[in-house]
Image (cartoon, rainbow, N blue to C red):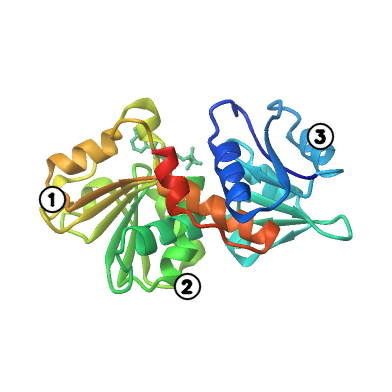
Amino acid sequence: MDRYAVIGNPIGHSKSPQIHRLFAEQTGEQMSYEALLAPIDDFAGTLRSFLSDGLGINVTVPFKEQAWALVDQHTSAAQRAGAVNTIQRQADGSLLGDNTDGKGLVRDIQHNAGLSLAGLKILLVGAGGAARGVIQPILAAGPAQLCIVNRTVSKAEALGALFIDLGPVSAAGFQWIEEPVDLIINATSASLAGNLPEISPKLIRPGHTWCYDMMYANEPTPFNRWAAEQGAERCLDGLGMLVEQAAEAFLLWRGVRPETAPVLAALR
Ligand code: ATR
């Protein structure tokens, strides 16, 4: 049986095994997919041991940057993201690192929710690894403007500088911008602690602005609750992105792209 896994710490609550099992059932691919807990101080050893036999692995928090440093080759998406969430063992044993997070986000917004990013004014909140992972695919979709805002402005500026050759990217602090935008994407980890990034409510034009929280939970996230209170047109969470990034990994590994809608419906 072809073996795949997701590796992280913690890993117990990962939905990836369920998602990939549903993909395998749907496409008739003969494969197994398990959850693998790596000790914080031995990601490399756990990864290598699995990939001596396994064909591919998804990498999640907090190991995506370490995975980037460990693989032998990077796709252009992974190169730009500085992080790897999908690894494929090649025929010669070398490891190819990809990053499908951004593709997953863009596909969820454009294909599942039906909002084309072309020509939009987009605000990306946060300047950590999660934000970096999605910038290239967003710029490739042709927005009019992508402004990275972060509590620590210097990090937004440094991040923007890495992508300036790819499109209209800029950087700002939370309080600098008050003009409404078309789409706000929350890539901060604030929701994890039940907090909100302190951005201006004026960024949301009621009945127009869409909001996307890359986090997801059983209930609406704090960011999406706040956005709904400001009258946001749509509030989406990151479950669709999770399923879409998984579908991109499945496509890389198995050469077939599964239908995501039934899997997303099953998870909801
Ligand atoms: P990740 O890999 O999830 O992106 P990270 O690299 O630690 O994690 O980045 C976390 C991001 O969330 C950063 O942009 C951080 O802002 P700072 O750079 O100013 O620290 C942001 N963040 C976390 N908690 C936040 C909060 N309560 N309000 C605003 N931003 C927050």
| Residue 208 visible | yes
For residue 30, above or below residue 110 = above
- Residue drawn at x 40%, y 30% is 192
Q: Quadrant of ligand 1?
A: top left
Q: Are marks 3 and 1 in contact (CB under 8 Å)?
A: no
Name the residue beneath numbered marker 1. 202
For residue 43, side relative to residue 192 (left or right): right
| Residue 85 visible | no
- Residue drawn at x 64%, y 39% is 63
The quarter of the picture where the C terminus appears is top left
Q: Say which of 9 and 156 sits in front.
A: 9
The quarter of the picture where the N terminus appears is top right
Q: Residue 30: x percent and y percent?
A: 73, 49
Q: Earlier in the sequence, mark 1 or mark 2?
A: 2
For residue 220, above or below residue 206 = above
- Give amino acid for label 1: Lys
Disc 1 element: helix
Name the residue beneath numbered marker 3. 45
The answer to which image quadrant residue 93 occupies is: bottom right
Q: Residue 8: x percent and y percent?
A: 63, 33
Q: Are marks 3 and 2 in contact (CB under 8 Å)?
A: no
Q: Report if the beta carbon of the residue with label 1 is closer than 8 angstroms to ligand 1.
A: no
- Give amino acid for label 2: Leu
Q: Earlier in the sequence, mark 3 or mark 2?
A: 3
Q: Residues within 10 Å of mark 2 (few under 14, many from 20)?
A: few
Q: Say which of 133 and 148 sits in front.
A: 133
- Residue drawn at x 17%, y 42% is 228
Q: Report if the beta carbon of the residue with label 3 is closer than 8 angstroms to ligand 1.
A: no
Q: What's the distance in space between the residues labelled 3 and 1, CA to CA?
A: 49 Å
Name the residue beneath numbered marker 2. 166
Q: Residue 11: x percent and y percent?
A: 60, 29
